[in-house]
Amino acid sequence: MKRKLFFVLIFFTLSHFCNAQNENSYATFIDSANQVKYKNVKKADLYIQKAKKIVSEKDLADFYLSTIQVYIDMNHFDEALEYCTKAHTIFTEKQDLEKLAKVNSFFAFIYAQLNDPQRAIKYYKIALGFYQKRDNKDGMIKALNNLGNAYFTLSKYDSSQYYFQKSQVIFKDHDDPALKAFVMSNLGKLFFSKKEYSQSENYLLEAKDILEKNKITDKEANYNVNYNLAAFYIERRNAPKALLYAEKTGDFTQKNSIDFNNIRYLDNLYNAYLLNDDYKNAAVAFKKYDSIREMLNIEEKAVNVERIKAQHEYELKQKVNELKQEKRNLVYIIILVVFLLIVVICILYTINYRNKTEALNLEKKLIEAREKELEFDNHMKEKLLVYQSMEQQKVDSIFKSILEKVNALKTKYQHAEEISEIINEIKISVKPNTWEDFEYHFLQIHESFYKNLEQKHQNLTNYDKRLAAMLKLRLSTKEISNLLNVTPKTIENSRTRLRKKLDLTNTKEDLSKYLDDF
């Protein structure tokens, strides 16, 4: 077991060592390319191709970044642009914003060198936005300076001045002499194009003083300042100073390197020699200039660059279209989700409405049942009231009949006092006013009957009201006559008079039904 673990450990150690060697080899090849890029372009390209073969997948994007810089330094902008496109794709997928900003800066610089300032401006602004969010002062100054140069190329001098001066503001709390010299030199170039020569010269000399005072050895900064000074004095026909700064520019260029910096330097040097009537050196400078221009093979590279630019634009459009499609898909999903939510809400609302309806119907049925129960209860009470009244009337009639017979016997018998006692007991047993009991029980069932009847018909007598109460109870003429102890004919006449008082004489409406509403 220990032996197996030992071999596994050796295997992983060797694998790690091999990977490290591959990484070191890839970095070594890039370093070798950087060392020979100004002297031997083909050899530098060969080193890059060797590095490309051994670089791992995870280091591919960083390899592209290193390679882009090498190709830019060699002025191979077609290859640089191609690697920029590849790096942009990888860093976009990884969402590595910092390295994506660096790629955008490369894009901007390449397009600026290829005289495509519009595209350069687009990428410089993207990079500026990133550096502003990170509060990266160096990055902000470089982006603003580059934007100023891009607008300068388009002859939009006001916009150019705006960005140069905006970068100047940052120097109030940020000290970087080399960058400051860059900005001052570019401002000098700008004011020269605006024919403000005095201000232009002040800016150019201030840039030179910054470099000298701070002993700046940065080749790019020194090249830029001396080149702009040489161009200024050539245009101002100041031969000694033109030649001085043209030759100084050469101190910060890679001798015999095939790049645009060397071409611009030789162009200035050629014009400075002509200005000083040194035709021999002018011819030598022009010969070198022409030789480098031919070796750069500008026409062929321009065609290649346009192809890569078109490819890059196509890929960007594809990504934009993909994003638009994703956005559309998201909108469709949102619409679908909203639709489903609406459907669910409608279903829930329908269920809730149905439950409420059923609850209301149930409640309605309960109310109806209670009403029917109450109506039935009232009806039973009415029946009981009528029955009790009828029975009481019978009892009263019996007692009256007995009382009459006893009074008749009183005159015939000697024991009149005993009979008188019997008569008194009968009188006590007979209720003096049976109607009051009837009315009391009636109002327990229909408490507002008399009140409502009086409000609408104020001319009714107590007899009329009693008759109306018995009619409401659906008592027949015979039943009413028995209760009131009158003849049925009298009740019929009383009914006719009551209809007249209730304004029902000329109508077919049933009297009992009419009284139900009170």
Image: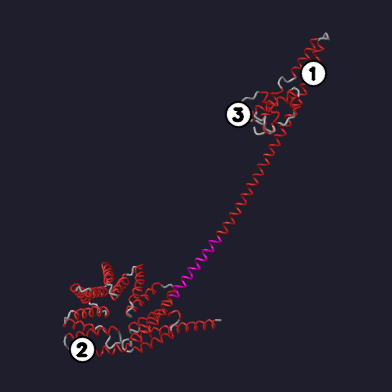
Q: Which residue position is annotated with label 1?
A: 401
Q: CA distance from mark 2 to mark 3?
A: 132 Å
Q: How is the image coloured?
A: secondary structure
Q: Which residue position is annotated with label 2?
A: 282
SS for dot 2:
helix
SS for dot 1:
helix
Query: Where's the C terminus, which quadrant?
Result: top right
Residue 68 lies, in percent from the top left, at: 37, 81
Which residue is most to the right? 413
Q: Residues within 10 Å of mark 2 (few under 14, many from 20)?
A: many
Residue type at mark 3? Gln
> In which quarter of the view is residue 302 placed?
bottom left
Q: Residues within 10 Å of mark 3 (few under 14, many from 20)?
A: few
Viewer-side label of 2, 3: 3
Residue type at mark 1? Ser
Residue 392 image label = none
Residue 7 lies, in percent from the top left, at: 52, 84
Magenta-drawn stretch, dominant element (helix, strand or loop): helix
Above-or-below relation of 5 to 425: below
Above-or-below relation of 218 to 324: below
Viewer-side label of 3, 1: 3
Residue type at mark 2? Ala
Q: Nearer the viewer, residue 219 or 437?
A: 437
The residue drawn where x is 36% and y is 74% is 123
The residue drawn where x is 76% and y is 21% is 396
First to last magenta residue range: 317-340
SS for dot 3:
helix
Pick whichever of labels 2 and 3 is earlier in the sequence: 2
Left or right: residue 117 compared with residue 17: left
